[in-house]
Amino acid sequence: MTVPDLVTTILIYFYAAEIHVGFVIISKKCFFDRYSIGRIIMLIMLSPSLGAIFMHILTDSYYFGDSIDDLIRGHLIYLALVMIVVAIQIPLYLWFVKPQNKSVAAFIYLCCLTFIVYNDFVENVYDGLSITGSVWIKNALMVIAAAVFYRFVILPLSRVSRIKQNRGMAVFVVIPVIAIAIKLLLLMLKDIANEYSYYGTGVVNAPEFKSSRDALAPYFKDFLRGWEIYREVYSIACYSIIAMLIIAFVVIVRNVIHLNEISRQNLEIQAARDDVKELSVEVMEALAHTIDAKDKYTNGHSIRVAQYSRMIAMKMGLSAESCENIYYMGLLHDIGKIGVPNEIINKPQRLTDSEYDVIKTHPTIGYEILSEIKTRPDLATGAYWHHERYDGKGYPDRLSGEDIPLEARIIAVADSYDAMTSNRSYRDFLPQDVVRAEMEKNKKTQFDPDIADVMIAIIDEDKDYCLHEHESLE
């Protein structure tokens, strides 16, 4: 083997190895957090490079013959093997990736397979074509092809993140599939027009070839008229398709990278929002515990009222967002008690009229505190109006009926339920049937009748009185 041919062989194997290694790197970058021995072995076994080696070995082993019919049969065997290998490798490869990434995984696999199938175009132009010139020029083209493939395919693909914006890639799977089909068609037409087999079997002197060629001539006359012209057309077509594929891959991959970067930023923003929301809830719950700690008999009251309010809202079919907002309002509905003296809150005896007037100021105090939260002005709703009555005899504004905000009407029912089912300084908790009777009795007077009916339904479902003074309702 001459030095130029040896260099050519090395470069061909380098090109194939680069695709093989690139497939493993891309798969890791796109779908896996870290490498492991088992995962590397799995990716090597599923690499299209390994499948291509298998295809060539079988094709070279099972193709025998010296007629053009054998030549065509060899191509059909090769095509069948391609389909078999892909049908085995792709499902196994896709099995290891998340559902939202399957289309990108198929695209990556077929991209690598396409460049493997087109790898022989470099060899096919090494037979004295004027377009390539000397063998050193051909070797230079091989280096350029490998470098271009690495720069414009492997590197961009390796940057594709593992984020979930990849379903739209499914439509692009057809691009490498079409490219492979075009390559196989060109290869078959080339060998029919040529006078030797792509697999190395000479057919020029075989009588079967001449008869088959005469029979096929009317269908392939444009290709049979001048092999030198066709060889040039074939080479140009292969180069053009490779160039178009590289451009398509770069555009597609960059779009995916852009979408994934946007998605990553959105996920980070959403994670930050979730952290802030979680912190806000924890702060509100801590504040609720602080409020309730002023009175040992109301320990956990605000948490329970928030949970009962959310249960009522869910039972009424309100949206998930509305249910959560009502929960937050319930947590802070008594925040105004911060401004009420402890001796009044903890007084075991009946309150005087003046002391009761002080107690009645807590909705206004709560409203003044919560209205300072400009990003959540709705939080003040429950604190300000949860002591309004449906018949208009409540406080502080003596609103009635549906003039009272829905959230405040829900919190009023939940607040009264917890008051009746909790131990207080002046009495023990009430039995469930008494609580139910009070709810029924005060419909249309103290409570919104529809909301009271929802609470009664919840009571009826609670056969064992499980809600009684529960501090955690999930």
Image: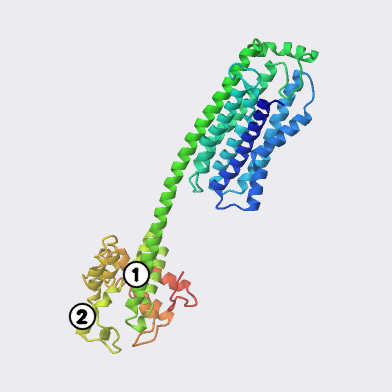
Q: Position of residue 245 (x, y in %)?
A: 54, 30
Q: Amino acid at mark 1?
A: Gly
Is 471 on the left-hand or right-hand side of 114?
A: left
Element type at marker 2?
helix
Is 423 on the left-hand or right-hand side of 354?
A: right
Q: Amino acid at mark 2?
A: Asp
Residue placed under numbered mark 2 in the picture: 357
Q: Position of residue 314 (x, y in %)?
A: 41, 63
Closer to us: 459 or 137: 137
Q: Dividing the picture into quarters, in which one does residue 198 lie?
A: top right
Q: Quadrant of the N terminus?
A: top right
Q: Position of residue 79 (x, y in %)?
A: 69, 30
Q: How is the image coloured?
A: rainbow
Is 65 on the left-hand or right-hand side of 250?
A: right
Q: Dividing the picture into quarters, in which one does residue 259 lie?
A: top left
Who's the residue at 75% across and 18% down the image?
A: 68
Which mark is on residue 330?
1
Q: Dividing the picture into quarters, in which one does residue 433 lie?
A: bottom left
Whether 164 is drawn above or below 82: the answer is below
Instruction: Looking at this view, name the residue that lies furthest to the left.
Output: 354
Who's the residue at 51% across and 48% down the image?
A: 162
Whether 377 is drawn above or below 76: the answer is below
Disc 2 from disc 1: Cα separation: 23 Å
Q: Are marks 2 and 1 in contact (CB under 8 Å)?
A: no
Whether 217 is drawn above or below 359: the answer is above
Instruction: Looking at this view, name the residue that lies furthest to the front.
Output: 3
Element type at marker 1?
helix
Residue 199 visible to the viewer: yes
Is 196 on the left-hand or right-hand side of 24?
A: right
